[in-house]
Amino acid sequence: MLLVVQDSGDLARVEACQAIYSAASSARVNWVKSSGLAVGDWRQTSSLPPALQTIRWSAGPLLYLGIYLSATHPFPPENWENLEGRVIERLRKWTGLLRCLSLRRRALVLNQLVLSKLWYRLNTLIPAPGFLTNLWTSILGFFWSGMHWAPGGVLHLPLNEGGEGLKCLHTQVCVFRLQALQRLLYGAGSSAWSVLVHAILRCI
């Protein structure tokens, strides 16, 4: 559960919603096992409703849906630790089969089995400095087996234009940002996440 609190009245409404949920489902939220992210100057848990005082409040990093959130660091390094190593390890497992793979099949392996590990975080977070550049060097080394026969940019072209259709990491990040902006500006209705985004943009 992720709570975005704007004023003290929100906390009372959370407790009221939890009471209605418990009455309707005969189930309770185990607040003792819950963690909360304290954002801003507010740090006093004594002003919270009794049910919410048992939450483990901290400034982060807090893991939520596979992403670390932090009130003190805009880009928690925990989101990128060991990720590059895991991708390179997956490349290493395919290295023994390179002689059996055509260039087209190598591109398919990279797009579907290797780079797919990155899309979730790149869709959600701004990558750490140098992360994409270092990873792209390893990807090119895997694709060409040490001998670069063409510029890396050629590989991103479609097959009918002489390329291999290999995903470009930097371009994919831009695509994710444009898709999010499109959903925000032209999405049907007013989803809960759009309210939060508008609040963040007003503070920039």
Image: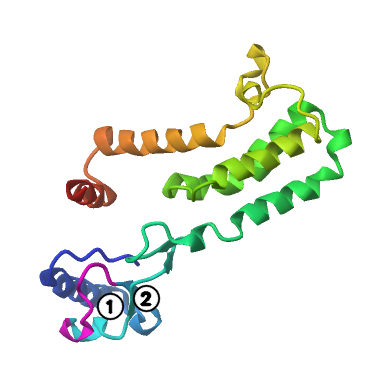
Colouring method of the image: rainbow
Name the quadrant containing residue 184.
top left
Q: Is residue 159 above or below residue 134?
A: above
Q: Residue furthest front?
A: 130
Decide: is 159 above or below 37.
above
The amino acid beneath tag 1 is Ser
User: Camera-side residue: 171 or 132?
Assistant: 132
Which residue is located at x 22 percent, y 67 percent?
40
Residue type at the position of mark 2:
Ser
x, y percent for residue 165: 63, 25
Q: Residue at x 26, y 73 (%)?
A: 21
Question: Which quadrant of the figure contains the N terminus?
Answer: bottom left
Secondary structure found at label 2: strand
Please tell me whether the stretch drawn in magenta is mainly helix, strand or loop. Answer: loop
Q: Residues within 10 Å of mark 2 (few under 14, many from 20)?
A: some
Residue 22 disc label: 1
**Which residue is labeled 2 in the image?**
35
Instruction: Point out the stretch of residues depicted in magenta.
Output: 38-47
Q: Position of residue 183 (x, y in %)?
A: 32, 37
> Could you tell me if residue 115 is visible in this image?
no
Marked residue nearer the N-terminal end (2 or 1) = 1
> Badge 1: few (under 14), some or many (20 or more) residues near its Cα, within 10 Å?
few
Q: Where is residue 16 in the image (x, y as percent from the top left)?
A: 17, 74
Who's the residue at 77% across and 32% down the image?
144
